[in-house]
Amino acid sequence: MSSPPEFDPETGEIFEPTKPNLGEQTVSELSHALKRTLEDRFGHVRVRGEISGYRGPHSSGHAYFALKDEGAKLDAVIWRGAFGRLRSKLQEGLEVIATGKITSYPGKSNYQIVIENVEPAGVGALMALLEERRKKLAAEGLFDAERKKPLPYLPASIGIITSPTGAVIRDILHRLNDRFPRHVQVWPVRVQGETAAAEVAAAIAGFNAMDQKPALLIVARGGGSLEDLWPFNEEIVVRAAAASKIPLISAIGHETDTTLIDHAADLRAPTPTAAAERAVPVRADLLAEVASLAARQKRGLSRVFSEVRLRLQAASRALPKPDDILALARQRLDGAGAKLPRALKANLQTHAVALARQSGRVSLQPLQQRVAESRRRLGEVQARGQRGLAQAMAKSRDRLASEAKLLAALGYKSVLARGFAVLRTAKGEPLRGVTGVSPETRLQVEMADGSLEVLAKPASKQGTLF
C-alpha cells in the first residue's frame, strides 16, 4: 500500500511522501518517453481549427504556425516536402482540417501536430479561398476579355477533355452527331480527386503541343459539390486554359455552377450538352440557307440577263436600217457616174471651140501642132478623168462593203447563221416569250437557210411551249 499523505503544520500544505524506491530518469529520457507515448496514442489524427500566426514558409522551406479554436491552441509544423504537395493555399484566419500526427518537441517541452495535408473546412472556407484566388488571377489579366479568342464557325476537329466513362462524353458526342458530325479526339482525365487538376492541365497543354491540333477544345465535367468541382479552380488548370492557343470552351457542372476555368476560357457553356451546341452549327439549317442563297442567285442572274436582253433589243431598234445607211452613198455614186460623161463631152467641146477660134489666126503648121498638143492634153485629161472615176468608184465600193459588213454584224441574220432561230406569230410579229401563246398556235420559225411553220405544244411541267 502507498503511504498516506503528510501534513506540513508550518505551511498548511498536504503532500505525498517521498518514494525512495522510484527509479530516476533524466529530462531527455522523460521527454522522449512522453514523445513516444503521444505518437503511439495519437499516431494519425484530423484536427479542425483556424490558422493562426501563419507568416508563410520559413527560409528552410518548412512552415510553422498554430491551429486554434475558442478554447485551445495547438502548435503545427509542415515539413518542406509536404508543404510543396499541398493542394490548398494556407492563409491567416482560414478554417481548415489538418491531417497529421501528434508529437512533442522536447526542446520546449510542448506538443505539436506534424501536418501532412490541409484542406479548407466547409463551403465558407472554400468560397473565401476561391474569391481570393479569383482576385489574384484577375489582377494578372488572365480573365481579360481582350484575351478571348473567337471560336471557329465549323471546326474540322474537336478535342474533348473529360472522363471517358461518364455520361458527359456520351451527351457531347450525341449532340455533335445530331447537329453536325465532326472528327473528335478525346483526352481521358480524372475530373475529381487529387490528380484531376494536374491531368486536366496536362491535357490542355498536350493538345496545344500536337502537330495536328484540333480547331477547338472542350473541357467538360458533370455537376457536383463545390469540393467535387474544386480541381477546376486550381491555378494550374486556370493558367493552362488561359495559355491555350486553341479556342477553349469550359462546360463544368450545371448552369448554376461557376469555376475559375470558366473565367479563363474563351467561352463558358452552362452544360456539356450546351458546349456541343456552341461548337458546331446545325447542318440542316446550313443546307437550307445554302439552298436559299442558290435560289436567290439564280433569280438574280435571270433578272440580269433579262435586263441585258431588253437593253440589247432597245439598242438594236435604235440602229439605222441598212438601206438608209447606203442610200446616200448610192445616190452620190449614181450622180457622179451620170455627170462624168457629160462633163467629159462638155470639156471636149469647150476645147474644140477654142481650137476653132484659134485656127484662123495661125498658119497650118502651127495649127496642126496646136491641134496635136490639144489632143495630147485632151488625152491626158481623159486619162486623169478615167483614173479619178476609177478611184471614186473603188472608194465607194470599199465604203459600201464596210457598211455592208457592219450591217451583217449588227443584224439578226448573223445570229441566225450561228444556229439560232426567230419565232414569229402567224402575222409575222416576233415572239418575245411563251406568255400568251396557246397550245395548237401556228408559229413561223426563221433560220439561216429558210423558214418553217410549227405548232406550239406543251413541253414540260413548267408550262413552256415549243
Image (cartoon, rainbow, N blue to C red):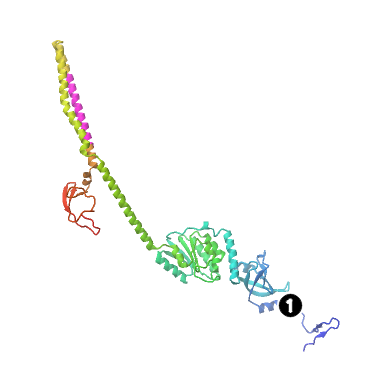
In the picture, the quarter occupied by the C terminus is bottom left
| Res 371 visible | no
Q: Is residue 86 left or right of residue 370?
A: right
Residue 454 appears left or right of 121: left
Residue 337 position in % (x across, y down): 17, 29
Magenta-colored span: 375-402
Q: Where is the N terminus found, in terms of image quarters?
A: bottom right
Towards the viewer: 437 or 87: 437
Determine which residue is flagged by label 1: 30
Mark 1 residue type: Leu
Q: Residue at the far right: name it.
A: 10
Residue 438 position within the rendered picture, expressed as x and y whole percent measured from the top left: 20, 55
- Does residue 168 lie above or below 293 as drawn? below
Query: Along the horizontal axis of the image, is 107 left or right of 395?
Result: right
> In terms of depth relative to the viewer, which is nearer, 327 or 25?
327
Toward which corner of the image does residue 368 lie, by quadrant?
top left
- In this orientation, which residue lies closer to the viewer: 110 or 291? 291
Does residue 119 sit above or below 311 in this rendering? below
Q: Is residue 448 above or below residue 135?
A: above
Residue at point 47% right, 67% down? 272
Q: Position of residue 348 (x, y in %)?
A: 15, 20
Total residue callouts? 1
Magenta highlight on residue 34: no
**Residue 383 falls within the magenta-colored stretch:** yes
Q: Main secondary structure of the magenta part?
A: helix
Q: Residue 138's quadrant in the figure? A: bottom right
Residue 443 placement (x, y as % from top left): 18, 51
- Please name the residue shown 33% across and 56% down the image: 295
Residue, far front: 436
